[in-house]
C-alpha cells in the first residue's frame, strides 16, 4: 500500500508543479506582450523614434532639429542610440517621466519613475545638450506631438512629459518597419573633443554622453 500511496502522491505533486510552471509562463508571456517596444524607423524620409504600445504605434521624436547638428552625430545615429536608451529604461521600469535638468553643469534630458523632485544623474541620462541650448525649447522641439496636445506642461523652467498620459491619448501611426542595422549611412568618426567653458574637456559627443 505504501509504495502505491507514494506513487499517487508523487503524481499529484507533479501535476501541481506543472500547473505552477504553466501559470508562470503564461504570466510572463502576458507581461511581455504588454511591454512598450521602442525603435527607430524611417518615415517620410526622416528618422523617428517610435513606441509600440497596446494601443498601437506612437511617434515620439522626429530627428530633424538643428539643435544637434554641431554634435557630429547624424540623425539616424541619434535615433538609433536614443531609441535603445528608451528601451533600456523601459525594461528597467525607470521610464515614466521625461524632464530637463543638469549633470555636472551640463544641460541634459533625463528620465524618472516619479514626477516630483526629478534629479538627473548619469544612470537616468537620456541625452546631453549643447551649452548654448535652451533645454525647455529642446524638449518642445523633440516631443512636438506631446506639445500639440498639451501633454507636456512647463513648470519652474522645467518641461516634464508624462509618458503614460501621453501614450493614452497620442495619435497613432500606421505600422512601419524599423530602420535596419547598420544605420542608413556609415558611422562617422567622433568629432574632436571641445573644451568647455570651465576649461575641462567633454569626454564624448554632447548628444550622447554616458
Image: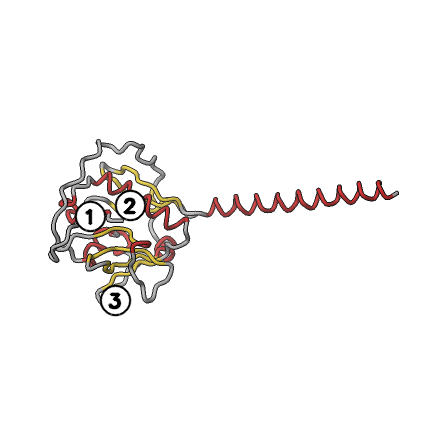
Secondary structure at badge 3 equals strand
Q: Residue tagged by mark 3?
A: 155
Secondary structure at badge 2 equals helix
**Residue 6, percent from left and from top:** 80, 43
Is residue 30 shown above or below 136?
above
Residue 148 visible at all: no
Q: Is residue 2 left or right of residue 135?
A: right
Q: Residue tagged by mark 2?
A: 82
Residue 181: quarter of image: top left
Any mark on residue 160, and which?
none
**For the residues carrying marks 1 and 3, which lies nearer the camera in this image?**
1
**Residue 31, percent from left and from top:** 50, 48
**For the residues carrying marks 3 and 2, which lies nearer the camera in this image?**
2
Q: Is residue 87 left or right of residue 159?
A: right
The front one of 12 and 189 is 189
Q: Residue tagged by mark 1?
A: 203
**For the residues carrying marks 2 and 1, which lies nearer the camera in this image?**
1
Secondary structure at badge 1 equals loop
Q: Mark 1, residues whose alpha carbon is within 10 Å: few (<14), some, or many (≥20)?
A: few
What scheme was used to colour the molecule?
A: secondary structure
The quadrant of the rendering that contains the N terminus is top right
Contact flag, marks 3 and 2 (Cβ < 8 Å): no
Amino acid at each position: 500500500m505504501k509504495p502505491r500511496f507514494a506513487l499517487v502522491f508523487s503524481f499529484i505533486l507533479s501535476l501541481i508543479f506543472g500547473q505552477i510552471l504553466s501559470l508562470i509562463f503564461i504570466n510572463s508571456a502576458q507581461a511581455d506582450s504588454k511591454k512598450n517596444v521602442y525603435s527607430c524607423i524611417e518615415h517620410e524620409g526622416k528618422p523617428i523614434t517610435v513606441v509600440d504600445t497596446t494601443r498601437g504605434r506612437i511617434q515620439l521624436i522626429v530627428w530633424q532639429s538643428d539643435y544637434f547638428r554641431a554634435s557630429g552625430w547624424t540623425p539616424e545615429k541619434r535615433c538609433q542610440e536614443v531609441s535603445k536608451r528608451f528601451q533600456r529604461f523601459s525594461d528597467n521600469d525607470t521610464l515614466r517621466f521625461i524632464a530637463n535638468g543638469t549633470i555636472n553643469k551640463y544641460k541634459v534630458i533625463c528620465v524618472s519613475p516619479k514626477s516630483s523632485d526629478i534629479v538627473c544623474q548619469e544612470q537616468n541620462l537620456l541625452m546631453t545638450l549643447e551649452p548654448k541650448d535652451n533645454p525647455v525649447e529642446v524638449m518642445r522641439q523633440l516631443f512636438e506631438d506631446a506639445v500639440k496636445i498639451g501633454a507636456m506642461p512647463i513648470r519652474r523652467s522645467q518641461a516634464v512629459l508624462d509618458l503614460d498620459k501621453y501614450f493614452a491619448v497620442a495619435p497613432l501611426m500606421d505600422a512601419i518597419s524599423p530602420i535596419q542595422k547598420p544605420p542608413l549611412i556609415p558611422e562617422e568618426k567622433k568629432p574632436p573633443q571641445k573644451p568647455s567653458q570651465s576649461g575641462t574637456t567633454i569626454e564624448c559627443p554632447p548628444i550622447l554622453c554616458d
